Image (cartoon, coloured by chain):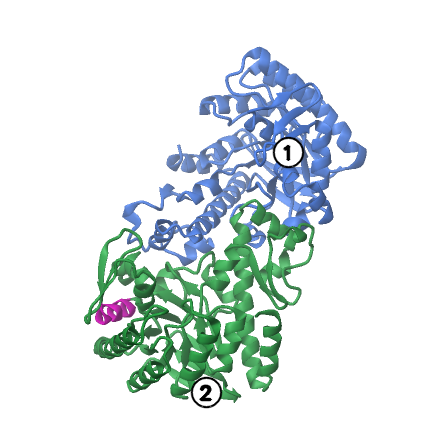
Chain colours: A green, B blue
Amino acid sequence: MGLKFELLKKDGKARRGRIFLPHGVVETPTFMPVGTNANVKLMTPRLLNEIKAQIILSNAFHVYLKPGLDIIRHHSGVHNFIGWDKPILTDSGGFQVFSLRKGRKVTEDGVVIRSPLDGSKHFITPELSMEIQYTIGSDIVMAFDYCAEPGVSHEEAERALELTTKWAKRSLKKLREFSDQAIFGIVQGAFFYDLRERSAFEITAMDFDGFAIGGLSVGEEYDITMAMTEFTAPLLPENKPRYFMGAGSPKIIVDLVANGIDIFDSVLPTRVARHGQALTWKGKINIRAAKYKFSREPIDYNCQCYTCSSFTRSYIRHLFDRKEILGQILLTIHNLHFMMELSAKIRDAIENNTFSELRKEVLTYYD
Amino acid sequence: MGLKFELLKKDGKARRGRIFLPHGVVETPTFMPVGTNANVKLMTPRLLNEIKAQIILSNAFHVYLKPGLDIIRHHSGVHNFIGWDKPILTDSGGFQVFSLRKGRKVTEDGVVIRSPLDGSKHFITPELSMEIQYTIGSDIVMAFDYCAEPGVSHEEAERALELTTKWAKRSLKKLREFSDQAIFGIVQGAFFYDLRERSAFEITAMDFDGFAIGGLSVGEEYDITMAMTEFTAPLLPENKPRYFMGAGSPKIIVDLVANGIDIFDSVLPTRVARHGQALTWKGKINIRAAKYKFSREPIDYNCQCYTCSSFTRSYIRHLFDRKEILGQILLTIHNLHFMMELSAKIRDAIENNTFSELRKEVLTYYD
């Protein structure tokens, strides 16, 4: 199997761990930057190294559509293609099945989904998803799941759960035919406690290398997200890594870690950067605000990133004002650096039994 | 005075020189990357250092409009504002007077010009241009000139020349009231030999630190550009640097150097990069071409830039295909690196008396 997990320390429910993967070691808890079209937007791999990204998420379905598996195969995997030699986790396409649900058709066997690029139809099955993720050569493969929409009935959520379990079984079976890549199972169950419990029971019964909580952070109230996480996380085995899919605000991250989650990903820090929002240790700021016109301060005095050690708020504001992409680049560097530094501080705090203080501090500025 | 020039070596008319400026030494011949809105598009200052840019051009008029002189003053100059500690040359706004000629009004005193940003009117005089460039704090200031449109009559070209001479005098006088920055005079005269000769005579009679050939590369036939340069360059003093304004193709650069030009600038290498065109030692390539779909070659095997040492043509093509800005970033790095390497090779060739061979080689691939 492609993964070893060490649980090094606990502070309350918060876990300090270490995941050994073919392309390197991942210290947890950690945030994972997202690379949608075989790149983390505006970031070169060496910038990702500089902000100390340990593992990035690559979207299997997007890569499958473009550039396509033939080109990935020709490069012997996505690592060579994108020039990144550290671990990669691939999602299974399950989330795209959810987000691209217009014109989608779900059967027991798989999902017919329309390409957002050209409208072409693609039949995605657990087996195909495994072949895609095998070709990509990711360090962590995700099982192909079925994520129910927010607001579905108990009955619909149950059907989604059952499909997820069946597809998890088929994913695991298929992948093991040709690969020893690590693979995570995904717990679904919408916002129903009994279904979350059943899904956790069924998924953790299988020989996965780690487990994800899926189907949350999809538009529901924050209290529901956290209630479901608080309920589901303890149902996952202690000795395997836990991944919450799609969480990128500082607030949710400290709340998830407090519930024993190890890894999380989101496009949020990079997306808001492109719109002028910077994450700082004193909360968010919008760099386009008039009050920064003359500010010679860095984005954050407490930040060591390239952007903060080189440029003033006034300059970055000017770049946004003139629609110069360099402004977006500088904020992307800063925001990802912030997320990785937040991750590092969380790890330190757990080691020192001070995680609840750190969490309180973060929640003072992010609510 | 803010400049010392050493003419180190000649190979035919090609000159190997060295310009000493407040922010550093510039080895010539050299290309200067252009930073229009207080940034070289998609390039951080450390990337500019990496590709060995020695001096960049900053557009005085654009900076004057945005962010405005108050913000530049607040940062004690453009160097601090943009985070670049090497030399900067500023154009005077003369070229913007030329390129933004719609709604423009030229008088003996100066030019009323409309802002491309909001249509507001601005009255630019030689004196204002000097104040702008003084506030910017550039290492090389350009006199405020009047560039005639291609195709003007002898009479109109003569009037432009006369204004240029008067404005040059006023520029020099004004700047010396408060600054010892280096300042270059600009030779105009459209495509008329007699006017070029007269302009060169009048401009070089003044105590400028260097001289530029302006009003060329503005849409005329290439033969005219070169005929005018060949005629004008020898009219400039041997012991001062010579700058051809607006030249960015490898072909024109070797042709200019062959005529004794020392420095040149253009947005071309960065602009074409953003459209997928890469400069290589075997000519230009368009990275969007289908034939590169599977190419695991770098852009140029003979190139040591970050892009060429890390990424395949196939990958960069994919980024352009998916409209990911990272593709534009990678080609911008490559093209600017190419221009700086071309500059370095030209300098080496002049030192070794092999410039004509290098020129021939470049012209084989760029015509």
In the rendered view, does B303 fall on the left or right side of B164?
left
Q: Do residues under tags 1 and 2 come within 8 Å of each other at their CB atoms?
A: no
> Element type at marker 2?
strand
> Element type at marker 1?
loop
Q: Is residue B85 visible?
A: no
The residue wearing badge 2 is A7
The residue wearing badge 1 is B241
Report the disc number at residue A232: none
User: Which residue does the image show at 54% across and 28% down from the upper left?
Assistant: B259
Q: Are marks 1 and 2 on the same chain?
A: no
Instruction: Specify start and end residues of the magenta stretch as a single range.
Output: A125-135
Determine which quarter of the picture holds residue B114. Answer: top right
* Foreground residue among A229 and B28: A229
Q: Is residue A132 magenta?
A: yes
Q: Which amino acid, by three-letter code, is at mark 2?
A: Leu
- Eye-nearest disc, 1 or 2: 2
In the rendered view, does A252 fall on the left or right side of B195?
left
Image spot of residue B199 (x, y percent): 64, 19
In the rendered view, does A340 fall on the left or right side of A136?
right
* Foreground residue among A312 and A293: A293
